[in-house]
Amino acid sequence: PKYVYTWGAGKADGDGTMKALLGGKGANLAEMTRIGLPVPAGFTITTEVCTYYYANKRSYPKELEAQMQAGVANMEKVMGHKFGDAKGFPLLVAVRSGARDSMPGMMDTILNLGLNDDTVRSLEKATGNARFAWDCYRRFVQMYGDVVLGVQKREGEDHEPFESVIEHYKHEVYGRDIIDSELSAEDQQELVKRFKALVKERTGKVFPHDPWAQLRGAAGAVFGSWMNDRAIVYRRKYNIPTEWGTAVNVQAMVFGNTGEASGSGVAFTRNPANGENEFYGEFLINAQGEDVVAGVRTPEPVSKLKAAMPKAYAELLKVRKTLEKHFKDVQDVEFTVQDGKLYMLQTRNGKRTAAAALKFAADMVKERLIDWKTAVLRNPADQLEQLLAPIFDLAEIKKAKAIATGLPAGPGAASGKIYFNADRAAAAAEKGEKVLLVRVETSPEDLRGMIAAEGILTARGGVSSHAALVARQMGKVCVCGAADIQIDYERRVATVKGQNFAEGDYLSIDGTAGTVYAGQIPTAPSEIIDGLLNGNKAAQKTEKFKNYVQLMDWCKKATKLKVRTNADTPEQTAQALAFGAEGIGLTRTEHMFFEGDRIDAMREMILAETQADRETALAKLLPYQRKDFFGIFKALKGFPATIRLLDPPLHEFLPHSKEQQLDFSKKIGVAVEKVMTRVHELHEFNPMLGFRGCRLGVKYPEITKMQVRAILEAAAEATKKGFKAKPEIMIPLVGFKKELDQQVALVHEVAAAIEKEKKVKLSYQVGTMIEVPRGALTADEIAETAEFFSFGTNDLTQTTLGMSRDDSGSFLGAYQETEIMPKNPFASVDQSGVGQLMEIAIEKARRTRADIKLGICGEHGGDPDSVKFCHRIGLAYVSCSPYRVPVARLAAAQAAI
Ligand code: ADP
Ligand code: MG
Ligand code: MG
């Protein structure tokens, strides 16, 4: 088998499509060679050798040695130098690791390999440049000693051992700290001697003299580094399979350290931060390899190269064009200039911010480099939210001090006075203060404070905690689970690593990164939000806004899957529509009960002992709900609204602290003991699996009836006022057809009554949420009654996996680390488990009712991978929180392309 792929002098065995076999670096070096760019010759040892190496007790296939020799011979021929030549100019090589994507934790590159006490002399003689030759040798011994022989910092040492030697030497000889390029040939020579002694002292081994031994050692170190702790951790984090393996690239050296006409640089073909079409990069004269990024000397902007080396610069600009034309994407390149001549050492697609991705894509369509479909694919859906988030003032954030980190749960920047309780937060906001709500964790009782706050910060909780969920739905900035923050509710202080922040002090949070800052940092809204939601004309004229609108138009053209929103208020609905939502996929009626005094009526209802008392309390809630629904219908402008009947356990609505219970009992005039008894009675060990969902309506039909009446009366009123309302009444947590039958009968009964009372003809649908496995498995039966299904994947995940969303935080991390579950199943649909149940349900339901309407309303509706899955299994729509609508639209379009 072929284990070695060579390139050089315009020819290459491999090409850019062979990243799996050759790694990203090797494949693109071959590709650049093929299109005629100046790439020093070399060869790639394939990833298959890595696989072989680990399958065979760290040994190599027997064919490899001969193929490597042929590879070196090819380099020698192209370059006109001999590997290990102790008479003429010796061929020196770079040994470079090459996974599919560059990967931290992999072995660092080794430069100038092939030098020893003999070849360094021949290099000196051939170039007449002693400083250069010994600089190369010194660098080589240092790099090889570090990464191959393992001479590294020991516990308790502050400095790299080789760097210590250099520093010590400089002070000994010069009495001060000079820069490396000021070291003379003699200095370098002495350093080589000391380095070798250090290697001997630390490893007991003699530094290898034979270039072939050096080469084998370096290649082995690359393969060995694939199983480094750091590499393993990185692969786990980014879901990179261990089987991929790494390739090794061996490439002829070119030298940026021969003098003032040489140097090394890195560049992007366009600006990866803001997307501007400008050459963007850095360059260091008389430098090699990592000097540019090491930060010892400050590099020059690449544009300065024009004056310093006009010919090489002109050539580089030509390469820039060629690369973009060929790869049709922005490239991130590494290059070296040797005595005025340019060499390309690497190219890959450049990483970019969301803002840059948007501009790149839009510009490249205009330049006819890519078509609109490619442009849609070039915008990463999971980064799109970055574009919508308010931003910190860039200059101010540099001065700010980060004090803690948590999970980035709601992107954007927020700054405000901290409050530890919802009421005080809301009161302060009413007075016009900018407020951050800071809690250990949040619950529905905190909603008022969350609405009032600029941002939410919690010390506990994950990306699907209550705080995160609500923040996403409301588009609030949120950092959750910032464990370093201790909150003392009583003293009203938050303590972070010994520093105290009292209520009313300023904190700032970055929900895109998950960072918490001390003090106040000014923010500004994103142009896109300003233009879409606030109708700001100036914002609408910005290029960013126009590019965004263009992107969404393209999405519309491509998409099959519709996007709806989860919204509980007219404001959220209007926002979602502005983002392009086509209806509501989930209105959670219970959220409405927490506004103002309504909670009192709700609690009265729960305390009632007779049906009559319950109905009296419910009658108080009816007008509130009717008004809410009317507002939502109005905001929807004729789009449909799926409205879910009461779902959470009643317990959640009752006051829990002694203080609150006392307040409440006084307010409605019942004994506090009675309140406490009811709280106690309703307490459940496992509320997620308790008295909730349609079970409430089965036991208390009057609750269902009141809610249906509110919905349908609002719809009737809408019709009377001349606009269309399309309610879809959704019964939650159905596992048995008979549960649904019974609730649907109530719906029709109320509808008939209203039609008679108001002399109107109502148009509505009744359907169910599929969120327990039994519901999915008996979907054929349920579909006889249900006109639509919406997959409630939050609960379906809980009930299928037998994991509580709120209690899984303690072990989910370990599950992800050990790759039992690579992704958080509450953030991204568990496709083979939960997804399979969805597919079964769809298949069965269609057998009964071919045209059944199918959607999803769990948090997953805004997760790009889950959206793509929903497209594949043929749902009609996904529904997600308003600020996630653009993300879902982009993902849906990408799935269809
Ligand atoms: P990384 O993946 O960490 O970027 P590379 O293998 O690209 O590692 O090497 C790092 C740097 O080493 C390059 O940017 C370049 O400056 C230098 N380098 C690599 N190969 C060569 C070579 N053949 N000649 C000269 N310098 C090289
Ligand atoms: Mg590189
Ligand atoms: Mg549910």
Image (cartoon, helix red, strand yellow):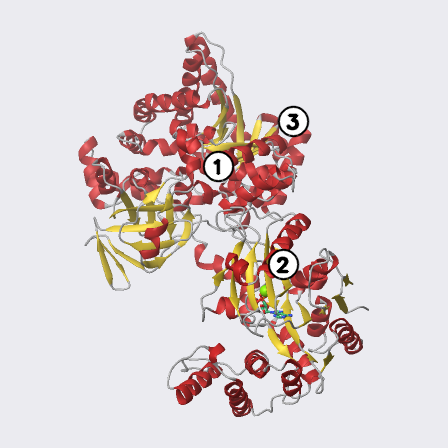
Q: Position of residue 98 (x, y in %)?
A: 64, 66
Count residues near mark 3 (Cα–Cα under 10 Å), then give few for <14, some for 14-19, many for 20+: some
Q: Distance from label 3 to label 1 (Cα)?
A: 48 Å
Q: Give the residue displayed 44% in from the left and 40% down from the top.
A: 388
Asked whether 804 or 137 is in front, the reply is 137
- 275 is higher (above) or lower (below) than 775: below
Q: Amino acid at mark 2?
A: Thr
Q: Secondary structure at mark 3?
A: loop
Query: Which residue is tagged 3?
Result: 849
Which residue matches tag 1? 543
Q: Quadrant of the C terminus?
A: top right
Dot 2: within a 10 Å radius of its alpha carbon, few (fewer than 14), some, or many (20 or more) residues? many
Quadrant that contains the N terminus: bottom right
**Residue 441 drawn at (x, y percent):** 34, 50
* Mark closest to the chain's N terminus, 3 or 2: 2
70 to 282, vertically: above or below = below
- Comparing 694 with 481, the one in front is 481
Amino acid carrying mark 1 in the image = Glu
Classify mark 1: residues with Cα within 10 Å, few (<14), some (14-19) or many (20+). some
Left or right: 49 as drawn, with respect to 707: right
